[in-house]
Amino acid sequence: MRVALPPAEAFRLFTPSGERGWVPGWEPKFPCPGAPDTEPGTVFTTYHDGRGSVWAVVRCQTGRAIQYATVTPGQRAGLVTVTCQASAMGTEATVRYDLTALRPDANSQLDHFATNFASFLGHWERAIAAAAEA
């Protein structure tokens, strides 16, 4: 996806706190407030789109890449990785979800997510562009 900002600024949009600026209802809760939200080992929880999830920062290259481990109890678990690279338009952000269903009936949810992933990222791109214009 394209972000019309330099990589260091675009990267911030994919951090736990940075997503608040463009994801309606995104409100991460930190059990240890005050710690940097991109520090590996940082844990936070979210309740978004009807799902409660636990997240942990696995690795971070500030301004370039961040990876999260995430678990939605009883539904899915896996990794989410965002990499930001300079491009002619500002930043090319690569978003990767590697998820596993935690019960058989959750497979259909992941199949739906995979089928609609391009649309999902298109929504992210438009939401980020709208937030940048505001």
Image: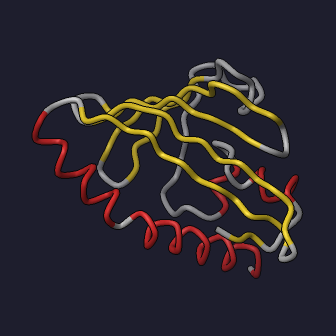
In the rendered image, the residue lying farthest to the left is 105
Residue name at image x 62 percent, y 64 percent: 22
- The picture quadrant where one finds residue 115 is bottom left
- The picture quadrant where one finds residue 30 is top right
Q: Quadrant of the C terminus?
A: bottom right
Horizontal placement of 83 versus 87: left or right? left
Camera-side residue of 80 and 133: 80
- The picture quadrant where one finds residue 20 is bottom right
Residue name at image x 70 percent, y 51 percent: 18
User: What colour scheme was applied to this rendering of the protein?
Assistant: secondary structure
Horizontal placement of 91 versus 113: left or right? right
Residue 84 location, x and y as percent?
A: 76, 53
Horizontal placement of 62 versus 24: left or right? right
Residue name at image x 59 percent, y 78 percent: 126
**Count of picture labels:** 0
Residue 108 location, x and y as percent?
A: 17, 51
Residue 64 location, x and y as percent?
A: 81, 45
Camera-side residue of 86 and 133: 86
Residue name at image x 85 percent, y 45 percent: 63
Residue 75 location, x and y as percent?
A: 24, 36
Instruction: Classify 100 as above or below 130.
Output: above
Q: Quadrant of the N terminus?
A: bottom right
